[in-house]
Image: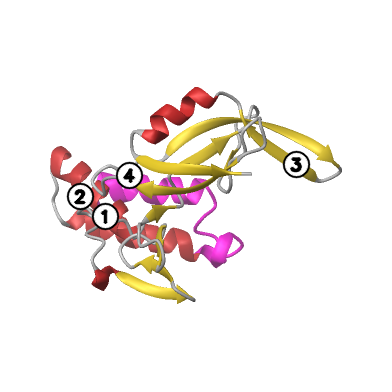
Amino acid sequence: MSNLIEHAKKELELAGMMSEDSDYNGMLGKAALELIEVFSQQGHSGCSAGMTVSLFRKLADFKPLAPLTLLDDEWNEVGHETFQNRRNSSVFKDAQVSKAYYISAYTKKTQTGSCWGGGLTLADGRTMSRCYIKDTKLMPTIVLDVIEEEVAKDDWTMTLKDESQLEELAKFYDFTFSL
């Protein structure tokens, strides 16, 4: 047994992931160990191992390896005149606008460190509309600091802390605001 397999098995056991009372009755640990066993048999060097893990991670996460083309064959209609990209499920377009937008263009990070998706509100009450993609080769997710505030019991708002952070977002996306 290779050192990698021994290490993986020991760590999975210590984490309790191989036992019947763990998540999915130990199936997660067994599935991960099976992947480690195949990976171990491939005989990677340090460099190729890291490259293979990185490539596998992208593929397993349904991430594209090459930039999106935004051509007609990349889209599925998911609602009335709303289309979702087949290669990146966070990219959409509407038939009327026909510009692609990325719903993962930003993540909101609160003062407690928790992160959220969803709409973005500015201090003046305007809300950000969609983030239209400028270049499919450059689609990062930008972290924006927000102030989270409970305005009523179980009713929270998140307001952008510093509007200058929008400058970084604007490098990659076109966006507008509405009231």
Q: CA distance from mark 3 to mark 2?
A: 42 Å
Q: Which residues are magenta?
A: 1-26
Q: CA distance from mark 1 to mark 4?
A: 20 Å
Q: Which residue is mark 4?
A: 139
Badge 4 marks a residue whose secondary structure is loop
Q: CA distance from mark 4 to mark 3?
A: 29 Å
- Amino acid at pointer 4: Met
- Amino acid at pointer 1: Phe
Disc 4: CA contacts within 10 A as few (<14), some (14-19) or many (>=20): some
Q: Which residue is mark 1?
A: 56
Q: Position of residue 154 (x, y in %)?
A: 81, 46
Q: Position of residue 137 (x, y in %)?
A: 23, 46
The residue lying toward the viewer, choosing from 138 and 29, is: 138
Q: Earlier in the sequence, mark 1 or mark 4?
A: 1
Q: Write the residue at 53% across / 26% down.
A: 163
Hey, which quadrant is residue 35 in on the image? bottom left
Disc 2: CA contacts within 10 A as few (<14), some (14-19) or many (>=20): few
Q: CA distance from mark 2 to mark 1?
A: 6 Å
Q: Nearer the viewer, mark 1 or mark 4?
A: 4
Q: Are marks 4 and 3 in contact (CB under 8 Å)?
A: no
Disc 1: CA contacts within 10 A as few (<14), some (14-19) or many (>=20): few
